[in-house]
Amino acid sequence: MSGHSKWATIKHKKGIADAKRGQAFTKLIKEISVAAKMGGAEIESNARLRTAVLKARAENMPKDNIERAIKKGSGEMGNAVYYELTYEGYAPGGVAIIVDTLTDNKNRTAADVRSTLTKLGGSLGTNGCVSYMFNTKGVITYDASKYSEDDIINAALELGAEDVSNEDGVIEVDTDPGSFANVLEGMQKAGFEQDSADISKIADQMVQLDNEKAHKVMKIVDRLEELDDVQQVSTNLELPEDYVDEEE
């Protein structure tokens, strides 16, 4: 059983479905365009592009948007250069936080991330200060009311998934990053419609906080995710059983 289901569950509940769909699409489009620029427009021969497109499809991005993003990346991005930068630091309560960004302006992004963290009680650390606590995994979730856990387990493990867990009505399939695309596509062909699919940084050990401190951490996560250059925010926070989103 995976030890991060509570964070993954709340993350996915708060993700695309909470009126941030347009912003999320913008970030996915950037990811697709950069992948196409770096490795070409052929999905089958460009592993990074294939993964980005699958993530976009998993979030129900229209086909036309995906195709335009590929065309933009493969020939219409001009001389724009994008950098993949990762920032590490701490949120209140000693929670580790990793911020993955994709930017055309390193100084702007560094300033935005640092300012957001410090204003809300966090701090920016040095490279490597918390990343050793995390592993990169593919995470695919399914609605446990729609599918049998045994059916998901049998199909996912046969396709090469590493682990399957079931908690709070969410069946979670974990994969190696390199197997993510094959597992997701295989599950779709087998008739399983995912609720979410992403490649995420997952902590080895989770930190438990009370509701008040957990809200402070989640506020930082929300504010960071609102930054245009931020692609993903990862923490080792395990939310309390009685946690309720302040915005609900």
Image (cartoon, rainbow, N blue to C red):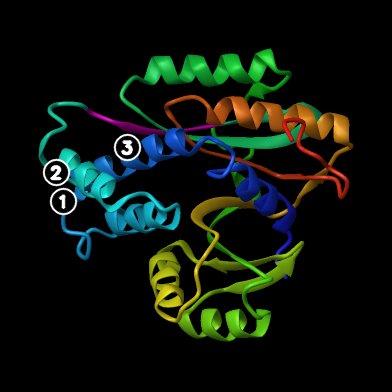
Marks 2,1: beta carbons within 8 A: yes
- Camera-near label (1 vs 3) is 3
What residue occupies the far left of the structure in this picture?
A: 75
| Residue 80 at x, y percent in the picture | 20, 26
Q: Secondary structure at mark 3?
A: helix
Dot 1 and dot 3 residues touching (CB under 8 Å): no
Label drawn at residue 246: none
Locate residue 104, reporting x and y percent.
Answer: 31, 24
Stretch in magenta = 81-87
The mark that comes first in sequence, 1 or 3, is 3
What is the spatial separation of the Cα atoms under label 3 and label 2, in whole angstroms? 12 Å
Q: Nearer the viewer, residue 102 or 127?
A: 102
Q: Locate residue 54 relative to residue 74 in the image: left or right.
A: right
Image quadrant assignment for residue 109:
top left
Neighbourhood count class around disc 3 (C-alpha, 10 Å): few under 14, some 14–19, many 20 upward? many
The image position of residue 190, as x and y in percent, is 44, 81
Front position in the image: 155 or 67 = 67
Task: Compute the Cα span from label 1 to label 3.
Answer: 15 Å
Residue corresponding to mark 2: 74
Type of secondary structure dominating the magenta stretch: strand
Instruction: Please say if 109 is above or below 150.
Output: above
Residue drawn where x is 32% and y is 54% of the image: 53
The amino acid at mark 3 is Lys
Out of 115 and 154, give the one closest to the viewer.
154
